[in-house]
């Protein structure tokens, strides 16, 4: 249940249009809901009220049935849903339960909405250093889309060809937040962070040869950046980067006169 739905229930009780027993039934799904025929998991239906975004389903290490059960349980009480790290078998199981969900195989995500998306607020640039980083960047984009944030993707602007990056500086400087996904030596956030005045969310990816140690080299490089204003999330965590960038945009919007 989201904040708007809860407010509707409370206002109906206040106006006498809903009795207390019916309201209690409507609120019975808070703060959790059992997912699965055998109660394999308890999904957090209260998270959007607390944190502004519903619980996402992390499909990796779940069976297709467990992922689909969790997705269906969350969709029953929310108006939007994100499933991350979904293999093809997870996607098929979720789509069987939620046929209106949209599957992005490259990002390994499924997004579902009960209603059409509202007009986006703010603008986040999601940057990938190379084609190999696109999956993580796509996860960030899918997250931001469900945050109702405007997104511009800028792909293949790694430091091996700085002319490609310099050609996109106007877009980067005009954004509210820039999310940067890069593997190998992880230098791209430092370069961009030294050229723009907006917050940077750096995402190290597990892309690179043996000495990259599955993204550890990029992670350490980003944490040790000499450019200020860079926050770093965990390796391959496009979802976490999207949530952080979305919260920054929302917070900035609330602070403006005539806020959205």
Image: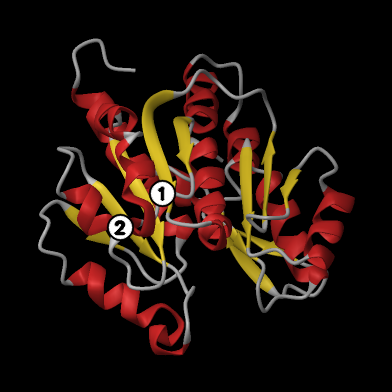
Secondary structure of the residue carrying tag 1 is loop
How would you rate the neighbour count of disc 2 (Cα within 10 Å): few for under 14, some for 14-19, many for 20 or more?
A: many
The scheme the figure's colours follow is: secondary structure
Which callout, 2 or 1, points at the residue further toward the start of the chain?
Answer: 1
Quadrant in which residue 77 is drawn: top right
Confirm whether residue 2 shows in the render: yes
Q: Residue at x 39, y 38 (%)?
A: 125
In the image, taking residue 105 as reference, residue 148 lies left or right, namely left
* Element type where label 2 sits in the image: helix
Query: Measuring 47% from the left and 23% from the top, which residue is drawn there?
Result: 120
| Residue that badge 1 annotates | 157
For the residues bearing labels 2 and 1, Cβ distance under 8 angstroms: yes
Q: Residue at x 65, y 34 (%)?
A: 22
Q: Where is residue 75 drawn, in percent x and y?
A: 69, 45
**Are there few (<14), some (14-19), or many (20+) residues within 10 Å of tag 1?**
many
**Disc 2: which residue:** 188
161 or 199, which lies in front? 161
- Residue 11: x %, y % from top left: 48, 20
Return the x and y of residue 191 as percentages of the image width and height. Answer: 22, 53
Residue 78 can be seen in this image: no
- The quadrant holding residue 258 is top left
Q: CA distance from mark 2 to mark 1?
A: 8 Å
The quadrant in which the N terminus is found is: top right
**Which residue is nearer to you in this view: 36 or 68?**
68
């Amino acid at each position: 249940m989201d904040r708007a739905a809860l407010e509707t229930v409370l206002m109906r009780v206040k106006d006498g249009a809903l009795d207390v027993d019916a309201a209690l039934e409507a609120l019975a799904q808070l703060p959790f809901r059992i997912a699965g025929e055998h109660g394999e998991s308890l999904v957090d239906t209260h998270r959007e009220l607390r944190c502004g975004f519903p619980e996402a389903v992390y499909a990796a290490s779940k069976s297709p049935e467990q992922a689909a059960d969790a997705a269906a349980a969350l969709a029953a009480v929310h108006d939007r849903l994100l499933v991350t790290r979904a293999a093809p078998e997870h996607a098929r199981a979720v789509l069987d339960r939620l046929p209106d969900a949209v599957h992005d195989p490259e990002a390994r995500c499924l997004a579902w909405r009960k209603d059409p998306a509202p007009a986006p607020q703010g603008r986040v640039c999601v940057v990938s250093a190379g084609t190999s980083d696109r999956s993580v960047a796509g996860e960030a984009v899918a997250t931001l889309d469900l945050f109702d944030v405007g997104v511009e993707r800028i792909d293949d602007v790694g430091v091996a060809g700085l002319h490609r990056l310099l050609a996109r500086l106007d877009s980067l400087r005009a954004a509210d937040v820039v999310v940067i996904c890069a593997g190998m030596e992880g230098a791209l956030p430092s370069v961009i962070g030294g050229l723009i005045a907006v917050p940077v969310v750096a995402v190290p990816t597990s892309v690179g040869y043996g000495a990259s140690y599955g993204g550890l080299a990029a992670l350490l490089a980003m944490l040790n950046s000499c450019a200020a204003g860079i926050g770093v999330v965990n390796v391959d965590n496009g979802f976490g980067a999207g949530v952080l960038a979305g919260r920054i945009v929302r917070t900035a919007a609330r602070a403006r006169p005539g806020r959205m």
